[in-house]
Image (tube, rainbow, N blue to C red):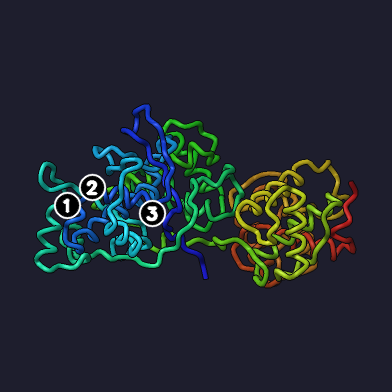
Amino acid sequence: MPAVIQPVIPENITVHLGAPGQNAANITVPFIDYVKNVASSEIYPTWPENALRANIYAIMTFALNRIYTEWYRSRGYDFDITNSTQYDQAFVPDRDIFENISNIVDDIFDEYVVRQGSIQPLFTQFCNGTTSKCDGLSQWGTVELAEQGLTPYEILQTYYGEDISILTDTPVEAVGESYPGTPLRLGDARNEVKIIQTQLNRISENYPAIPKIRLENGLFGTDTEDAVRAFQRIFSLPETAIVDKATWYRIKRYYNGVKQLAELISEGISIDEATLPFPADGLSPGMSGEEVRTLQYYLDIIAYFNPALQFIAINGIYDEATEQAVRNFQRFYGLPETGVVDEATWNTIFNIYRETAATLPEGYEGERAKIYPGYVLSEGMRNDDVRDLQTYLSYIGSIYPEIPEIPVTGYYGSQTRDAVYTFQRLFGLPISGLTGQNTWYRIAEEYNALKGLNYNEFEI
């Protein structure tokens, strides 16, 4: 099943003790303690319990919205929320916490408010309802509603609409910045690419000069490159067509804006929008499939050029040998030795592989096919790697009449795409017309076999 980007309850939250641009200290506290502090600062413990619960839902969900949208971090700040009631909600360091408020927070700590059909925390705006009024919840108004016998959910519906829900049993996890840590570029295949594609396509509805990306599939093709370049041009960023940290957060900021994610009238993020094409929780023993096969290929090639590591079979099964190879890799490169491929391990494996592929001397392959260049080849690309791919496919096509023999031009056009389609169908690969690691490996393997060569005996 595809993974979904579900919000989580963060372990900690960083609070700026002042207005956003004010020179003030930041303090990082456990999120549960933050909610208890704000609730003890914003509302009275003598209020009816249902009023207290409704207010705590609003306080907690408001903070989660700030974290989920990275409202401040996408603007270059190093905190999640302020303690300025002009912008956010009250937080008083080291204040006393009321016992009944603390108990309620403990009870509903893993719950938050959403608009039905959406997954992101609703922007649960609120005000006291006496000296200040707003479109959201009235804190004093909740007291009257609770005294009328309304439940916390009914009180929230009164202010935020009938179409809200309260999500429960939300996992608590450490939450870092969303930027993946390395720039995204042409040929990358990862979940973060899909996120950027979805966000750029939505932004393009408001900024039609940004071209639409045909498939939001996590593969950074030429249409994604064109959209990134157009976005950078419109918003005065260097036109590199590479999603670095500055571009990532500028995209996120404008996506939040056009979706109105930090407003009561938020357009919302549906489960379909948040669905990811690749496993979000990494790879671990017992798993199988194309992602595991890709992992094994990378580890095998790295081991060929690093004698401290060992070869493994590329069989698509996360078996004991694969787990041991992962542990050895983690130990060699100073990562926690878990045997599980989390994001940090995967990024290191991918970066080492790409560096290895980029530094091999010219002609290292001899008469054999080259190793995978480290990025997905797709329609619209033009370079020497495409030329190599066409060379291999053209030769294979001279043996297999089903595969059309294609001209070796270096341009990945419709003929190359169709030849890849056919190869994938004949050899039982997912049919996409794109040449990722597994397709390249099978093409190279078949090319070498037809020429009577061993794929893993390079002349370096």
The local crowd at label 3, few if under 14, some if 14 to 19, many if 20 or more residues have their Cα within 10 Å, is some
Real-space Cα separation, disc 2 to disc 3, in angstroms: 15 Å
Q: Position of residue 301 (x, y in %)?
A: 79, 55
> In this rendering, would 246 be left or right of 351?
left
Q: Residue furthest top?
A: 23
Image side of residue 43 versus residue 387, left or right: left
| Numbered circle sitting on residue 42 | 2
- Secondary element at tag 3: helix
Give the SS element for disc 2. helix
Per the rendering, the mark at residue 32 is 3
- Disc number for residue 139: 1
Query: Which residue is painted at 68% across and 49% down in the image?
Result: 348
Residue 108 shows in the view? yes
Between residues 446 and 156, which one lies in front from this camera angle? Answer: 156
Taking depth in this image into account, of 358 and 410 the one nearest to the observer is 358
Place of residue 278 in the rendered image (x, y in percent of width and height, measured from the top left): 56, 61
Ranked by sequence position, the earlier of labels 2 and 3 is 3
User: Alpha-carbon distance for marks 2 and 1?
Assistant: 9 Å
Q: Is residue 6 above or below residue 140?
A: below
